[in-house]
Image (cartoon, helix red, strand yellow):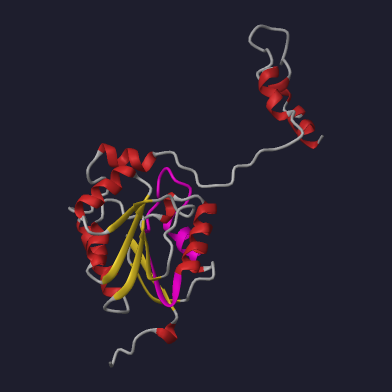
Amino acid sequence: MTKQAAIATHRSQVAPLSPAPGDETLLSPAFLEHFAAPYEIFWEGAASDGALDQLHEAAADPWGVDRRWYERRKRDLLLAMLPRERFRRTIEVGSSTGALAAVLAERSDDLVALDASPTAVAAARERLPRADVRLAAVPDEWPEGEADLVVVSEVGYFLSPLALEGLATRILSTLTPDGVVVLCHWRHPVVGWPLDGATVHATLRSAGLPPVVAEYADRDVELLVLADPGLLPDPHE
């Protein structure tokens, strides 16, 4: 088998280097048994290691959304870029403690806020007692029904590449013809997770979502608005 031949080439791991003490075989027969099976196991699904929930358990406001100027400014930028004054139904992916959901609710008839952290969901429900805040690990868990605004802010890099593709599929299945998608992510390196903001935006832009109709970028953050330009409201009306 090709796999066995490849393993055998690592002589320093599967055979003793010499008869001298300390030069014994490094990989035990029990360990090598894992590579002897005639099949391979692949995991296809969302990974959940609880790291984000641990962050929320350790600090009531782990991202500083209520105190940092970056966060307050970012929310103002996002709201200013929305192409309509009001939306029928908004889905926010990765709501954390609900700071952005609170201002999106003021522009929405109905808002659904999603987060995979039970601690964050509890905090968001306390902030927004009348909002629909749900514990959900996207893309496997997703609300039913249509939405004319989907906001993905500061969450895409916490997903696996496969889950990010699945999120795009979910958004496509939910978005109304006149719907708007807003992407908003940090532009600096993201430590401890596999993706960064640029990769998240490139992946979602190439996934069949509507085209970019507005964009903003500075040193710290990039915001993209995706929509059908022919269905945007007339600014003169």
The reply to whether residue 213 is visible in this rendering is: yes
**Residue at position x 30%, y 67% in the image:** 110
Q: Is residue 143 left or right of residue 20?
A: left
The reply to whether residue 184 is visible in this rendering is: no
**Residue at position x 26%, y 66% in the image:** 104
Q: Is residue 180 left or right of residue 25?
A: left
Q: Quadrant of the N terminus?
A: top right
Closer to us: 45 or 26? 45
Residue 160 position within the rendered picture, expressed as x and y whole percent measured from the top left: 50, 50
The quarter holding residue 106 reads bottom left
Residue 218 position within the rendered picture, expressed as x and y whole percent measured from the top left: 32, 66
Closer to us: 205 or 127? 127
- Residue farthest along the bottom direction in this orientation: 236
The correct choice, above or below, for 152 with respect to 181 in the image is above
Is residue 116 magenta-colored?
Answer: no
- Residue farthest along the left direction in this orientation: 67
Residue 237 position within the rendered picture, expressed as x and y whole percent measured from the top left: 28, 92
In the rendered picture of this protein, how many numbered marks are placed on residues?
0
**Residue at position x 38%, y 54% in the image:** 155
Is residue 179 magenta-colored?
Answer: yes
The correct choice, above or below, for 109 with respect to 30 in the image is below
Residue 48 position within the rendered picture, expressed as x and y whole percent measured from the top left: 45, 42
Q: Is residue 58 left or right of residue 94?
A: left
Q: Magenta part of the protein: which range?
A: 175-204
